[in-house]
Amino acid sequence: MKHAVSKSSPSARALDFSPWTKRFLFPALLLMLAFSSCSGKIEMAVRSDYSARIAVKMDIPEALSARIRQIGNIGASASLFDVVKIRNEFSARKTLLLVDASSASKDAMTAVLWVPNLEDLARDMSLTPPGMIRFETVSGTQAQGVLRELSITIDKSNAARAFALFPGIDSRLVDSLSPPALEEQSITANEYRMNLENVIIGKKAMPAFDACALEVNLTAPKTIVSATGGTVAGQTFKAKISLFDLLVLEKPIVLAVRWIN
């Protein structure tokens, strides 16, 4: 989906939304703002045999989901998370497996994924484009010896593939955000922020929007010696990626962790 933009000035260009975008973007942004902590969570535990367990949790407040359905033309009884689609999609995968997916309500979902071997996942080009996931052996200091490094890079070249790794979320919720990260000719970060401030949610709500983030917690099998994109304490790496940065991807998001082999 492309923005209908004017070439006259940045302000005019940033504020020119199509009726379709206006219809869907507003409720989806409200969805994000409704979270008390306004964040999704991914927890990953890597084992010494290079397998990994990943837990994902998503929850949408009921009052807000009703509004999303009303404006987004989504049935009142329809789930925003298609668990059947998730199970079907994962049934043919070998390097990223679905252990469990459940929806306690039409507005919530939890899932557990299993990676038999991170090296195999990084090499699986059917799921991940080159460079998005790397799992490599690197040299440390003489005292450290050989290290293992896991890195994830998300940029505009692979953003769509990154989202496709985990199907099942109603595509209208993603499309409604019209994220510049998925646009071939997108507006700039400043223009997108202008849309949010002046058209979508207003300046008063921007602090709440800016607090929206994806939390990533990773536990390594041994002590982490260095990391990029987050903080480290012993074997634990924590990162927080803002929703705005994910939607725009003006700069690549890079998370990397090195631990003693």
Image: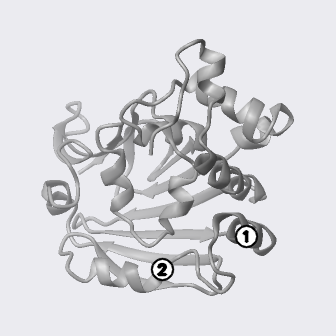
- Between 11 and 219, which is closer to the camera in this rendering? 11
The secondary element bearing badge 1 is classed as helix
Instruction: State the image coordinates of residue 63 (x, y, percent, origin top left).
Output: 81, 72
Give me the disc on residue 180.
Answer: none
The image quarter containing residue 11 is top right
Tell me the residue at 36%/45% (across/down). 159
Q: Amino acid at mark 1?
A: Gln
Q: Which residue is mark 1?
A: 70
Q: Is residue 80 left or right of residue 46?
A: right
Instruction: State the image coordinates of residue 221 (x, y, percent, origin top left).
Output: 34, 60
Q: Earlier in the sequence, mark 2 or mark 1?
A: 1
Q: Amino acid at mark 2?
A: Asp
251, above or below 104, in the image: above
Tell me the residue at 57%/84% (across/down). 103
Mark 2 → mark 1, Cα distance in angstroms: 19 Å
Q: Which residue is mark 2?
A: 82
